[in-house]
């Protein structure tokens, strides 16, 4: 399973490196959304600073939807999804590989957004240990849910509009917990944020476990 996961993740990441869609489109889109939030709230810096954690994670979710749609649309157009069904790769391995590839791309987006909130919003990343400790499980949960719902929606004609409707409600708990953890880190009270980081780790385990168990069935039916 792990060998299959590395193969699938390597294939997806090589494709993104060659096409540069992630760096050329998704990351600039995410930064642009952050800039627009800044323009909208700039007259009141107090509101902007208070809203920084929520704006950060809402932007990450927008970027995640784009990344998931991109990952599965390419496979659908080129017939790769049918090839995966016929290959000897295990369904859990394919799921883990897709999740890993999406997570790596999201980490790149989050790094760019982190630099953006420091420069544009004046955020103080003093609690960086909590920031990293909460961002990693949050990213894993988002990527796992995106991989599962992405393959569910890819076979439908309305996948571009259906995927956000399916994915965003499921990720609402991740958004809440990640925002609370970031608020604690940026406010200089990391002790209040670690319980939220633990909750994010629980969400990640649940989403990954559900994906491993259900991905094969969903792939066959999509």
Image (cartoon, rainbow, N blue to C red):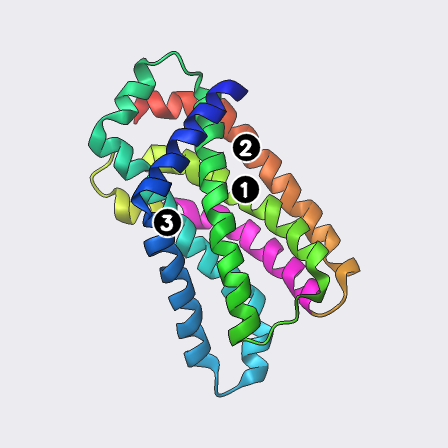
Where residue 204 is drawn, which disc sits there?
none
Per the model, the C-alpha gap separating discs 1 and 2 is 7 Å
* Residue 211, position as x, y percentages in the image: 49, 29
User: Does the image show residue 94?
Assistant: yes
Identified at 70% across, 46% down, the residue is: 198
Q: Is residue 194 left or right of residue 109?
A: right
Question: Start and end of the magenta stretch?
Answer: 165-186
Does residue 89 lie above or below 169 as drawn? Answer: above
**Of residues 127 and 47, which is closer to you in this image?**
127
Which residue lies under the disc numbered 1?
Answer: 141
Where residue 208 is drawn, which disc sits there?
2
Element under label 3?
Answer: helix
Which residue lies under the disc numbered 3?
Answer: 22
Per the model, the C-alpha gap separating discs 3 and 2 is 23 Å
Circles 3 and 2: CB atoms closer than 8 Å: no
Element under label 1?
Answer: helix
Per the model, the C-alpha gap separating discs 3 and 1 is 19 Å
Q: Is the residue marked by circle 1 packed among few (<14), some (14-19), or many (20+) residues within 10 Å? A: many
* Residue 108, position as x, y percentages in the image: 49, 51
Element under label 2?
Answer: helix
Q: How many marks?
A: 3
Circles 1 and 2: CB atoms closer than 8 Å: yes
User: Does the image show residue 164?
Assistant: no
């Amino acid at each position: 399973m792990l060998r299959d996961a590395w193969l699938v993740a390597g294939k997806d990441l090589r494709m993104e490196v060659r096409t540069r869609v992630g760096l050329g489109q998704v990351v600039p889109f995410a930064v642009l959304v952050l800039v627009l939030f800044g323009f909208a709230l700039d007259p009141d810096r107090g509101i902007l600073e208070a809203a920084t954690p929520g704006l950060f994670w809402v932007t990450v979710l927008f970027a995640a939807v784009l990344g998931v749609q991109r990952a599965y649309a390419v496979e659908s157009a080129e017939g790769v999804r049918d090839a995966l069904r016929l290959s000897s790769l295990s369904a859990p391995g394919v799921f883990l590989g897709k999740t890993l590839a999406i997570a790596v791309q999201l980490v790149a987006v989050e790094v760019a957004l982190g630099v953006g909130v420091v420069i544009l919003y004046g955020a103080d990343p003093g609690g960086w240990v909590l920031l990293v400790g909460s961002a990693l499980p949050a990213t894993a949960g988002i990527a796992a849910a995106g991989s599962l719902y992405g393959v569910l929606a890819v076979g439908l004609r309305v996948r571009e509009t259906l995927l956000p409707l399916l994915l965003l409600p499921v990720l609402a708990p991740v958004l809440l917990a990640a925002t609370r953890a970031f608020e604690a880190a940026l406010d200089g009270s990391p002790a209040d944020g670690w319980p939220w980081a633990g909750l994010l780790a629980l969400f990640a385990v649940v989403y990954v476990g559900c994906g491993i168990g259900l991905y094969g069935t969903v792939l066959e039916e999509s």
